[in-house]
Amino acid sequence: MVPKAFSKNSRLNTKFITMDLETITYNNTLIPYLLCWYDGKIKKHYFITSPAEVGDFITLNNGNVESSVLAMVLDAMKDICTRKYKGYKIYLHNFSKFDGYFLIKCLNQLGVCKPIIHKGRIISCKFKLFESNYNVTFMDSLLILPSSLRKLSESFSVETVKTHFPFHLQDINYKGPVPDIGLFDNISLLEYNNYKKQFIAPNKVWSFRDESIKYCQIDCIALYQTLVKFNQLIFNKFKLDITKYPTSFATRFSF
C-alpha cells in the first residue's frame, strides 16, 4: 500500500544522470582530479589540467590546484546545464558527504546553488550556471540505496561489472607496469593476477590517466544501470518516481 504522502505517477521517469569523482591526496588534502558522468547513452570525462601541462604530464602546485579543479567542474556543468538536460537529476553515490561538499564549494562559484541540508547531510542541491537558463538537481543515490555500489550492482545483476583501481597510488602521471597489489583495496591475489593479464600484450603499459577514466566511467554506468532497475521496480510496484524522493524507500515499504 502506498502512503498518502506519496503521489502516484502515470509514466516512468528516466531523466537522470549519474556522476562520479576520483581524488588523490595532495599536500595532505583530498583533491578531485577526475569527474565523469553518464546519461544512459553518452559518457563524458574531465581530467584535471594545469597551466604548466606539457603533453600528458600534469604539474600541480598550490597556486593552480583550486583553479584547475574549478575549471574541470565548469567544463562538466557547461555540458550538462543545457536545454537537453533541463530538470534532470544528477546522482552521485555518497553525494551527502565528501563529493557533495566539494561540489557545492565549486558550484557556488559557478552559478546559483541551493542545497537542502538535514542533520549535517546534503539531501539535494538545485543548481543553475550563471550563464545558463536550465536547472539540474544533484542527489545522493546512497540515500535511496544504502549499500556499496559493488554490492548493488551484484544484487541488481547489472550488465556493467565494477572493476578495481589502485587508490593508494598518488601519481596521476604514472605510466608503467601494473601497480603493486598493496596499492589496491579489497582485491584477492586471483583478482589481481587476472587484472594484470589485461596488460600482458607487447607495448601495453598501465596508465593512471587511462585506467582511472575507465574505472570512473564504469562506476557511472553501473550506478545508472542499477538506478534504472530500481526505478522500474518501484514504478511497477507502486507507480512512483524515485527521482522525486531523495531518501530511502526501504523504511517506507515492504518488498
Image: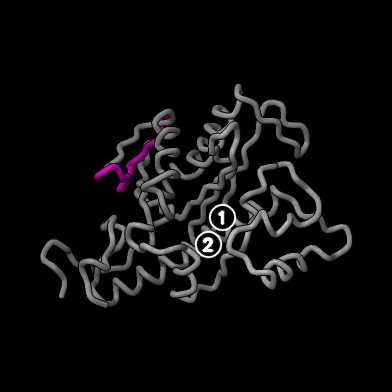
Image location of residue 28, percent across then percent down = 56, 34
Residue appearing at x 23%, y 76% in the figure: 254
Specify the segment rendered in magenta.
118-132
Q: Point out the image quarter for the N terminus.
A: bottom left
Q: Residue at x 43, y 44 (%)?
A: 98
Is 65 located above or below residue 122 in the figure? above
Distance from label 2 to label 1 (Cα)? 8 Å
Is residue 240 in sight in this rendering? Answer: yes
Q: Residue furthest front?
A: 182
Q: Amino acid at mark 1?
A: Lys
Question: On the rendered structure, is 43 left or right of 153?
Answer: right
Residue that protrudes farthest toward the right in the picture = 202
User: Furthest-top residue in view?
Assistant: 63
Q: Mark 1, residues whose alpha carbon is within 10 Å: few (<14), some, or many (≥20)? A: some
Please give the residue where the numbered disc 1 appears in the rendered image. 43
Label count reads: 2
Q: Which residue is mark 2?
A: 221
Left or right of 91: which side holds 33? Answer: right
Q: Closer to the camera: disc 2 or disc 1?
A: 2
The residue drawn where x is 87% and y is 57% is: 203
Q: Is residue 82 visible?
A: no
Does the magenta-highlighted stretch encompass residue 126? Answer: yes
Q: Nearer the viewer, residue 179 or 37?
A: 179
Magenta: main secondary structure equals strand
- Quarter occupied by the C terminus: bottom left
Q: Secondary structure at mark 1?
A: strand
